[in-house]
Image (tube, rainbow, N blue to C red):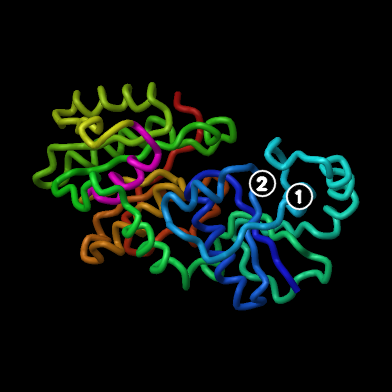
Amino acid sequence: MSLLVSLNGGLGNLLFQLAAARTARYVTPNVALIEMTPGLFGRLQQYIGEIEIPLASKLQHQIFASSGSEWDGPKHHFAKALRYVFRPLMLEPIPAFTGIPQSFRRMTHVLDGYFQHPDWYRGQVARICAELVQNRPALLPQELSGVVAVHLRRSDYVRQGWDLKPAFYRAVVDRINSLQGVERVMILSDDAMVEELFALQVQASGLTVVDKGVFGPSSARRDFYLLAASQTLFLSNSTFSWWAAQLRFHSDPGNDRLIYCPKPWMPDGSGQLLQNPSWIGINAVYEVDS
């Protein structure tokens, strides 16, 4: 039996998928990664370095990959036809918080999911964090003493109703102001306008907002490592910040209790498995603010 594990989404999802592929090797040694959008394997390598799990063949990508002209070629139309013939038999959707199935269908080739159940990632977190440390850009700090980092996840979360509303972040500001000796706050977000508005709110409360520009040009990679380096973390309900928290704990286990997270993690109550019992929960608000 051979298995392909799909690569989908942003950094957090990619790290879960890599963990799942490595775990799947305990089921069969014949495991490869398949990019559902071209370029994701290379992006993962920026954070992890060399990946021992190979990338699927071009023909397999032509059959299964959902988009991207990179896989076009003389056999493209034939492969596209094969995709419609074989996809119902050979694609195995894995719900995000479902553990490893007791068995896979005989014809399964592609495991497609986000693999956020501990069965998939528990044994891989320490290794992935060590690789993240090894591949951290040299100019980024390992430690930001006295800095509180707040992550705001927007983009597709807004469309799906998963974004945390302003009331949640007002509670975050109140919690920061209750901490002893905290003056500097770093704000990290994929939405520049919302980040700027939140910075005004933080400054109005008497706190100083850290200028991230001193650490280099804006990028997701820079923000990920800055989040992980901060002394205290306020997470969004995002796998991006979840992995930053894992890296923070890996670097300094004694600071694990200085990590705050939304509770519940998602509007439907799912995601409890991602919440470390030692993290401090802040009541999450998902309904529209009045």
User: For mark 2, what is the residue?
Assistant: 36
Depth check: give the residue in front, 130 or 161. 130
Circle 2 — which element?
Answer: loop
Look at label 1 and name its amino acid.
Phe
Residue 227 in magenta? yes
Depth check: give the residue in front, 224 or 189. 224
Question: How many callouts does the rendering have?
Answer: 2
Q: Give left or right: position of 5 versus 200.
A: right
Marks 2 and 1, how far apart in space? 7 Å
| Contact between labelled residues 1 and 2, with CB atoms less than 8 Å apart | yes
Q: Give left or right: position of 239 versus 172.
A: right
Disc 2 or 1, which lies upstream in sequence? 2
Measured from the top left, where is residue 198 in percent x and y? 31, 27
* Residue at the image point whose x is 54% and y is 60% from the top: 18
Measured from the top left, where is residue 15 in percent x and y? 49, 56
Look at label 2 and name its amino acid.
Met
Residue with the most extreme left position: 181
User: For mark 1, what is the residue?
Assistant: 64
